[in-house]
Amino acid sequence: MVYLILSQQSIMKGGIVIPNIDFTALMLNVSSSDIEKSDIITIGDTIYYDVTLVRKPMSCPYCKGKMIGHDHKRKLIKHPAVREHNGIIRYNANRYICKACGKTAMEKNPFSFSGFNSSFFLLRNVLKMLANLNYTLSMISDELNISATQLNTYIDSYITIPHRPLPECLGIDELHSEELSRRNSSYLCVLVDNEKRSVYNILDSRSKANISLYFSDIPREERCKVKYVTIDMWEPYRDVAKTYFPNCIIAVDPFHVVKHLHGNFERLRIDLMNHCDYGSNAYYLLKKWS
Ligand SMILES: [Zn+2]
């Protein structure tokens, strides 16, 4: 059901003049002088921003010849929701044809990246949510109505996290992941800055090959500055530390030492208990040890 249609000119609504083109320009982040035609239409729970841009002189990307207006191509681009109404830009993109070679080309799309059906505004909201580590990718995908595939493509294509220098005191540990266990490896490798007590990086597998590949990409000069590496008692970590951090002292994380001691002590206690007569004082004391 169409219940609100704003024309491209300013309209009177309740005695207030709504400068529609300016409003559209603001919502779409283009200048109002660039808009040839625009409408904002609400149908059901979706707001449609219909827009056609002013044609501009364009030279052919193939032969540099002069191009003239040809036709339009409709593109649908997802835009942020406003008051629980999803947004869609119905972009009537101008197509040009070259007078010299006859090839056609589209105008530069000011609303979205090529190959993406989400607007720059919507992707900016993605970035804001990504900055909050309490959100998972599927939560962002649901909240902003962007497919998980598109979200991943966006992150892989446009988000680069600058490399941080390795900490002087590096901790290597793992974390069990249900998600990974359905694929190739069931453990994530967690790299920790022991001094700052913060996570340095997380690798998607703790396999020796994977960790070696990661560290081999870091220049040797930087790896030589690592003074201490703390690990649990998993041998591949020790091998990797010896290979890639030639100046480091390898230490076993105290947590794992205590855990190991405790485990062995428990085994010893139960062995001793099993050698005592059932129901005797010694059996009872050993059974209630912990
Ligand atoms: Zn041409």
Image (cartoon, rainbow, N blue to C red):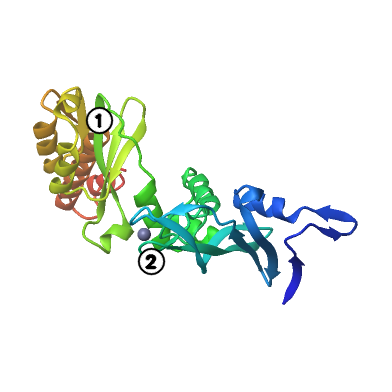
Q: In this view, does 290 lie above or below 105?
A: above
Disc number for residue 170: 1
Q: In this view, does 165 lie above or below 156?
A: above
Q: Distance between the residues labelled 1 and 2?
A: 61 Å
What residue is rendered at 49% in x and 44% in y? 132
> Callout 2, which amino acid?
Gly
Disc number for residue 102: 2
Quick one: label 2, few (<14), some, or many (20+) residues within 10 Å?
few
Dot 2 lies on which element? loop
Report x, y in % for residue 236.
12, 43
What residue is rendered at 14% in x and 50% in y? 275
In the image, farthest residue toward the bottom: 1
Horizontal side of 228 relative to 148 (left or right) equals left
Report x, y in % for residue 153.
37, 56
Dot 1 lies on which element? strand
Whether label 1 touches label 2, CB < 8 Å: no
Report x, y in % for residue 178.
32, 59
Quick one: label 1, few (<14), some, or many (20+) residues within 10 Å?
many
What residue is rendered at 12% in x and 38% in y? 240
Q: In this view, does 53 lie above or below 3?
A: above
Ligand 1 within 8 Å, label 2 CB: yes
Where the N terminus falls, by quadrant?
Answer: bottom right
From this viewpoint, is residue 283 visible? Answer: yes
Classify the position of ligand 1 by quadrant: top left, top right, bottom left or bottom right: bottom left
